[in-house]
Image: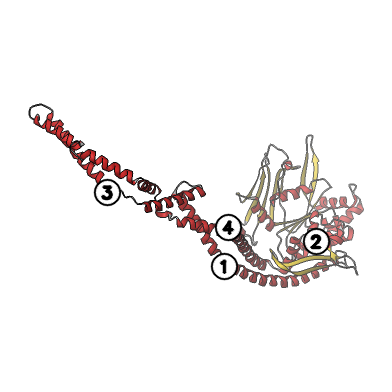
């Protein structure tokens, strides 16, 4: 239930606070007085787009706030799902800053606009004149029929499976597309992988191989140079070793007689030791140098293959080629396992489809029964609304593909006169008939689905007099089950309300304002009389107004 509504700095409203009561509240006022402003403010609370032009004073914030009593309403799950604290008296607020930035709050917690919109849909149902066109919209037809069929839980079960099926089919389609691409590339990928594996890259040390090949290719020159160097160091009487030995001998003769000779002798001895070790190392190294053309050819071929791979793949190191080999191997593995994954997803999709078929069959059956109830109840209201010969047909036909609401297609057909053929309702119903059909729908649904707050704008379009009285009686009955707020031009409807607000526009020396005034007693009678006969009240119009209220 809506407990309060406050509006500040919105359109022609400077500041306004309303406290709606239970039952049926009528809102009246002259054309242009600002009744639509109230609807616009409610629209902001329900998540509709904010318009910077709606701010009255562009230097201040526009704020629309409502307090709802949620006692007994099934909304606690919504709060839990969106990580919000549930409060029996919940405050919903929408702010528009001077720069046009919009913010939404639920119990002072900032929320995205879509969350505000989702909660608003559970709290308030607004029907305005342009919404008569909803009868031509598929989603609305399903919503109406499923309300009569009490399909809320069944639809929830179906939608859960449907979402899983959509996810699985999307994954399957993606995998099949990827597999098709891989199959076209796989021969080449496998060829590249085979080339890389043949190169045996994981134990390959490129720099060491290049050095070994260089030695094999120059083995004879290296061996000859080492042997020649060995001879010069230690090979004969004029070798370096012999010459240093003789130099040491000469100094040794003087070692005891001249200062510093011992140091020179020691240094020459150290040189002889170093030369002897160097000679032995060179001799050993020369022994290891081999002339092996076959091995050189093998190493040359291996390095040539490596250089070719590096050039082909535009890579500079063995490590980069190894990484490429791993990536290609993963692609081949993924291609090999994709068949298993495809089979698994196909089984999942098949299971989901069987469950969807079962649930859609249940939905179809409940909708057939719901359509019969809807036709009966709506036709009953048609009789009360002076459309005794009108009829409605809700046709439910089983389709061939799954969609978010089952496999059915629903059409609303209408006939206004006896003997007429049923046709699409939005094509054959007049404006007044559409208004009454929508009222019949709202009145019927109110018996099957709780609508905490229902706001009707110009539900009386195209009707007057006796029909207005009948609409008023129906609205009075509906208000026993919900809080009903009706914007109307008909005194016959306003006279049936429990509460009456008048919207009026006034101006001071500077600007124009809109205000909402609760009417009671004689003020209410005068307003009804004015609606009947105009500004000049007469005894007849006042008597008629009292009669309407009676």
User: Would residue 107 be found to the left or right of residue 216 on screen?
Assistant: right
User: Would residue 150 be found to the left or right of residue 473 on screen?
Assistant: left
Which one is nearer the viewer's eye here, 63 or 321?
A: 321
Q: Quadrant of the C terminus?
A: bottom right
Callout 1 crowding tier (Cα within 10 Å): few <14, some 14–19, many ≥20: few
Q: Earlier in the sequence, mark 4 or mark 2?
A: 4
Which one is nearer the viewer's eye here, 418 or 19?
A: 418
Which one is nearer the viewer's eye here, 493 or 359?
A: 359
**Residue under circle 4?**
185
**Which label sits on residue 344?**
1
Does the rendering let one see residue 263?
Answer: yes
Q: Secondary structure at mark 3?
A: helix
Q: Is residue 221 above or below residue 475?
A: above
Asked if labels 3 and 1 touch by Cβ distance under 8 angstroms, the answer is: no
Dot in front, 3 or 4? 3
Q: CA distance from mark 1 to mark 2?
A: 51 Å
């Amino acid at each position: 239930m809506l407990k309060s509504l406050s509006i500040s700095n919105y359109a022609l409203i400077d500041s306004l606070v309303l406290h709606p009561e239970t039952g049926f509240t009528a809102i009246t006022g002259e054309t242009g007085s600002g009744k639509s402003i109230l609807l616009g403010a409610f629209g902001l609370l329900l998540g509709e787009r904010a318009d910077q032009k709606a701010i009255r004073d562009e230097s201040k914030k526009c704020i629309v706030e409502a307090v709802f009593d949620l006692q007994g309403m099934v909304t606690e799950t919504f709060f839990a799902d969106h990580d919000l604290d549930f409060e029996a008296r919940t405050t919903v607020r929408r702010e528009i800053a001077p720069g046009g930035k919009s913010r939404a709050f639920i119990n002072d917690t900032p929320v995205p606009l879509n969350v505000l919109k989702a909660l608003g849909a559970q709290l308030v149902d607004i029907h305005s004149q342009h919404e008569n066109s909803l009868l031509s919209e598929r989603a609305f037809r399903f919503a109406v029929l499923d309300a009569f069929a009490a399909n809320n839980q069944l639809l929830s079960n179906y939608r859960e499976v449907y979402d899983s099926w959509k996810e699985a089919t999307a994954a399957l389609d993606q995998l099949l597309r990827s597999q098709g691409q891989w199959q076209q590339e796989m021969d080449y990928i496998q060829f590249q992988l085979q080339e890389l594996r043949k190169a045996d890259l994981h134990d390959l040390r490129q720099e060491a191989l290049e050095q070994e090949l260089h030695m094999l290719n120059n083995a004879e020159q290296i061996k000859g140079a080492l042997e020649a160097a060995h001879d010069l160091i230690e090979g004969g009487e004029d070798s370096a070793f012999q010459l240093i030995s003789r130099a040491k001998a000469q100094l040794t003769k003087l070692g005891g007689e001249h200062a510093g000779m011992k140091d020179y002798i020691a240094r020459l001895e150290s040189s002889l030791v170093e030369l002897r070790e160097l000679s032995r190392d060179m001799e050993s190294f020369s022994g290891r140098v081999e002339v092996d053309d076959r091995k050189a050819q093998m190493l040359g071929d291996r390095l040539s293959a490596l250089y070719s791979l590096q050039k082909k793949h535009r890579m500079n190191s063995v490590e980069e080629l190894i990484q490429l080999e791993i990536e290609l191997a993963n692609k081949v593995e993924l291609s090999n396992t994709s068949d298993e994954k495809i089979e698994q997803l196909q089984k999942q999709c098949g299971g989901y489809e069987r469950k969807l078929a079962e649930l859609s069959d249940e939905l179809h059956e409940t909708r057939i029964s719901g359509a019969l109830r809807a036709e009966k109840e709506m036709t009953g209201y048609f009789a009360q609304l002076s459309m005794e010969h009108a009829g409605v047909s809700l046709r439910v036909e089983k389709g061939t593909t799954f969609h978010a609401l089952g496999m059915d297609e629903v059409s609303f057909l209408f006939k206004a006169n006896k003997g007429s053929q049923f046709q699409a309702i939005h094509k054959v119903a007049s404006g007044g008939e559409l208004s009454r059909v929508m009222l019949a729908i709202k009145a019927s649904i109110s018996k099957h689905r709780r609508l905490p707050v229902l706001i009707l704008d110009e539900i009386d379009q195209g009707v007057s007099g006796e029909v207005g009285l009948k609409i008023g009686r129906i609205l009075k009955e509906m208000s026993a089950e919900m809080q009903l707020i009706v914007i109307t031009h008909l005194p016959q409807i306003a006279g049936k309300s429990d509460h009456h607000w008048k919207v009026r526009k006034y101006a001071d020396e500077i600007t124009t304002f809109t205000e909402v005034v609760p009417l009671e007693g004689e003020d209410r009678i005068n307003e009804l009389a004015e609606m009947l006969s105009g500004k000049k009240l007469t005894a007849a119009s006042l008597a008629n107004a009292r009669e309407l209220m009676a």
